[in-house]
Image (spheres, rainbow, N blue to C red):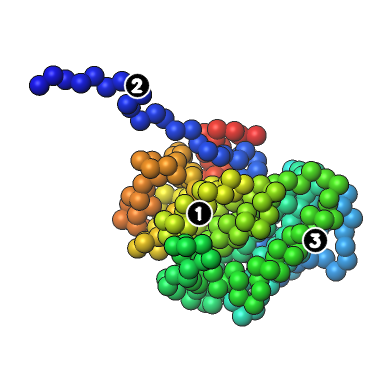
Amino acid sequence: MMATATTQTEKEKPRRFKFIPRHDVVRSLLSLSTLVYSYGDTWSLPDKTVPQDKPYAKNIDLKKDVPEEDREKYEIKQSVDWLDKVAPRGKVASFVNVNRTDLQAAVTSSATRGAVAVVFRGSESAKDWLYDIWIRKRQLSQPGVWVHDGFYEQLWGDGAYVKLRKALRKELTRLDRLPFRKIYVTGHSLGGALCTLCGYHLAIDMPDRDIIVVSFAAPRVGNSKFKEACKGLKNLHQLRMVNHGDIVTTIPWFAYQHVGDAIKQYDSDVKFLHEDKGWNKFWEFNMFNRPLAIPFTYHGTKVYWERFLANRRKWPSKR
């Protein structure tokens, strides 16, 4: 039998990453995702409006009775210090708190960076985990597009999404003189799932804006049709930050698919995983493809911070 030579065009060409935010941008989003956990506990919104020319740290009140070691433990101080450095005119414009579903999210902006961000808090209470393990799907208005019913209910329950969208539009109107084309949506854990779903809806509702979703430790949100619907939105860009060994990123597994390219973090290395077929395979986020450890060892923001900072030099754009 005559051998057939394989030409370059027949080989699978290396795929370029569709979208990689700069390292400093992702660090800012990780800082916001960290801070939102401790709203009302370690810090809160000030009683009076703070002028926009004041440092970012002045826009939040760190409670004086919290020991210094606790602030360090939860990465609060380093998050505030970083945002104070890169976004000195940052502002927490609005905070949405829905008691029934226990959803908490903030709308923030930075006149210096020319960016607005919607930040979702991750799983913290028993209510959150009840929604997390609720794996029944709900069909969206698009044919065949199904998403996790618990995530949907938490985002839309009691008008949460509508309130967030209203607060976001109000802030965009206030900053109309500035070039705020990009809207970032971010969150850790459950917050990562909510920001994935929220980003999808914002991309539909605001077609003139670039919606950039950067999730941390996010579970799967929808089915294959949801993934296709996200890819079909030209103004929607999604990146998942994932720790190797993080069990939350492997669930739900049956009939669910991840959305977007991913950066998988190890202790001293990173792996860039394309969403395209052949790269971002199911095994990469399979619950059996992980170190033997206590289930949530690699899930917390502490480990995400450690690996994120340790691998800074391996980032394609380190600024």
| Disc nearer the start of the sequence (2/3) | 2
Q: Is residue 303 visible?
A: no
Task: Tell me which amino acid carries mark 2.
Answer: Gln
- Name the residue that disc number 2 marks: 8
Residue 36 drawn at (x, y percent): 66, 62
Q: Quadrant of the C terminus?
A: top right
- At mark 1, the secondary structure is helix
Outermost residue, front direction? 143
- Name the residue that disc number 3 marks: 170
Residue toward you, 97 or 31: 97
Q: Is residue 4 left or right of residue 304?
A: left
- At mark 2, the secondary structure is loop
Nearest-to-viewer mark from 2 and 1: 1
Q: CA distance from mark 2 to mark 3?
A: 52 Å
Q: CA distance from mark 2 to mark 1?
A: 32 Å
| Figure quadrant of residue 280 | top left
Residue toward you, 107 or 126: 107
Nearest-to-viewer mark from 1 and 3: 1
- At mark 3, the secondary structure is helix
Dot 1, crowdedness within 10 Å: few (<14), some or many (≥20)?
Answer: some
Residue 215 drawn at (x, y percent): 55, 53
Task: Tell me which amino acid carries mark 1.
Answer: Ala
